[in-house]
Amino acid sequence: MIKGTVKISEEICKGCELCIVACPQGSLGLSSHINTHGYRYVELIKDNCTGCINCAIVCPEPAITVYRQKKQPKK
């Protein structure tokens, strides 16, 4: 299985939840905290991200960066 993770800029995120809906693994959720602009921002809530980039594609702000681990070569 491919492993990935996301970094979400808490100050850029406006909590529109588009990325939450787009995530097939259900890895994202709204934080209970509020950023300095008054928005609840999105955060990674499960460690099952595959790095599919759906969240970054639908994000209307440049708030999400997706990272993927390199595939391990088969021996």
Image (spheres, rainbow, N blue to C red):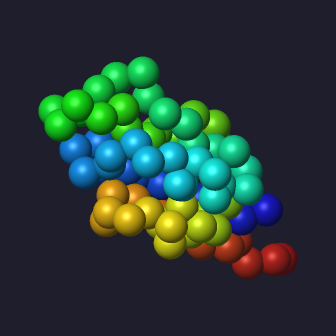
Depicted 27 relative to depicted 34: above or below: below
Asked whether residue 68 is in view, the answer is no
Residue 6 image offset from top left, x and y in percent: 48, 54
For the point 69% across and 45% down, which residue is it?
26
Residue 21 image offset from top left, x and y in percent: 64, 51
- Furthest toward the right, the residue is 75
Camera-nearest residue between 46 and 35: 35
Residue 2 image offset from top left, x and y in percent: 71, 65
Depicted 64 relative to depicted 25: above or below: below
Camera-nearest residue between 33 and 17: 17
For the point 73% across and 56% down, which residue is it?
24
Q: Quadrant of residue 75?
A: bottom right
Asked whether residue 4 is in view, the answer is yes
Q: Quadrant of residue 41?
A: top left
- Furthest toward the left, the residue is 36
Count of residue discs: 0
User: Which quadrant: the N terminus?
Assistant: bottom right
Residue 12 image offset from top left, x and y in percent: 25, 51
Would residue 1 be found to the left or right of residue 4 on screen?
right
For the point 36% across and 32% down, which residue is it?
40
Would residue 17 be found to the left or right of residue 50 on screen?
left
For the point 73% across and 78% down, which residue is it?
73
